[in-house]
Image: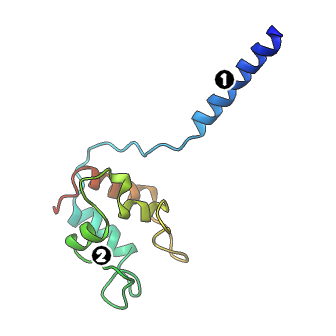
Amino acid sequence: MKLRYLFLICLSGVLLSILISSCKHELDVPMNPQISFGTDVRTIISANCTFSGCHGTVNFQKIQLLSYDDVIKNGGIENTKATKTTLYKSITGKGKELMPPSPYSPLTDLQIQTVLLWIRQGAKNN
């Protein structure tokens, strides 16, 4: 009986370890370098989101992402946790759908980290 009890405890410990190690965690993003909306974030959004038929000026889909104010308002960027914003969830696929949609390429990890860091740094219009 003791051997069976010891086996169950060990098995539970191993399973718990596997479960914990397989959990996804938020990206660990440093507060430096300072991210600029005008130089860094706008470039990512312009290249990946604002072409015709998406979030630009021509035939845009529901929302525009042309200006800083558009990104703040339509990206759901408020005084909330960065990973809970509409913008972050959209570019990581944790929202309703991944943006940009197929057949376009998703943002790279570096681009996602840049946007996330910008939001964490206060989403400044700089």
Residue occupying image coordinates x 40% and y 73%: 48
Q: Is residue 51 above or below residue 88?
A: below
Residue that lies at the very extreme toward the left in this rendered image:
126
30 relative to 12, above or below:
below
Q: Tell me the tag on residue 61.
A: none
Instruction: Give how far across and how far down residue 105 sits, in percent.
Output: 51, 71
The quadrant of the rendering that contains the N terminus is: top right
| Position of residue 5 in the picture relative to residue 30 (left or right) | right
Display coloring: rainbow
Q: Residues within 10 Å of mark 2 (few under 14, many from 20)?
A: many
**Which residue is at a point 49% across and 62% down the rendered structure image?**
93
User: Looking at the image, which residue sits at the far top?
Assistant: 2
Residue at the image point whose x is 75% and y is 20% from the top: 8
Frontmost of labels 2 and 1 is: 1
Q: Secondary structure at mark 1?
A: helix
Along the line of sight, which residue is nearer the eye, 39 or 84? 84
Image location (x, y in percent) of residue 30:
32, 42
Q: Residue furthest bottom?
A: 59
x, y percent for residue 18: 65, 33
Identity of the residue drawn at 66% across and 23% down: 13
Q: Is residue 25 left or right of residue 55?
A: right
Q: Secondary structure at mark 2?
A: loop
Amino acid under disc 1: Gly
Q: Which residue position is annotated with label 1?
A: 13
- The amino acid type, in three-letter code, at marker 2 is Leu
Please name whichever residue, 81 or 5, is drawn nearer the observer in this view of the structure: 5
User: What is the quadrant of residue 110 in the picture?
Assistant: bottom left
Q: Which residue is mark 2?
A: 65
